[in-house]
Image: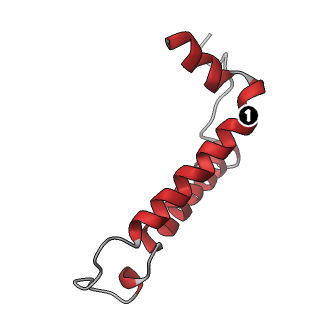
Amino acid sequence: MIKRVIDFFGDEGYARRRRQLFYLALILIVAADFLVSHEHAEYLWDRLPGWSSVYGFGSCILIIFVSKFLGHRAGLMRREDYYD
């Protein structure tokens, strides 16, 4: 059982299937936001269906790019053999 899971996430042969499952999960998350009541939202953007999903995805992308910038351009990342 565990070998099948490892093969699914590690093998390039399953790349298309993984991508399809990823897109399905994104669609289900956005669709679930339509089922939640937004009548007690404090701000206008909180009332928009799918806003939480878009905001979370955008925040993750921003964190990735900022950390890449800090690591590569700002000099926080060191060579692999730095402490040897």
Horizontal side of 80 relative to 57 (left or right) equals right
* Residue 25: x %, y % from top left: 53, 50
User: Residue lying farthest left?
Assistant: 40
- Neighbour class for label 1 at 10 Å: few (<14), some, many (≥20)? few
Answer above or below: position of 35 versus 59.
Answer: below
Image quadrant holding the C terminus, namely: top right
Q: What residue is disc 1 on?
A: 15
Amino acid type at mark 1: Ala
Residue plotted at (50% across, 12% down): 1
Tell me the SS state at disc 1: helix
* Residue 20: x %, y % from top left: 67, 45
Residue 63 appears in the rendering = no
Answer above or below: position of 20 versus 54.
Answer: above
Horizontal side of 51 relative to 3 (left or right) equals left
Answer above or below: position of 25 versus 49.
Answer: above
Taking depth in this image into account, of 8 and 65 the one nearest to the observer is 8
Horizontal side of 29 relative to 78 (left or right) equals left
Taking depth in this image into account, of 58 and 83 the one nearest to the observer is 58
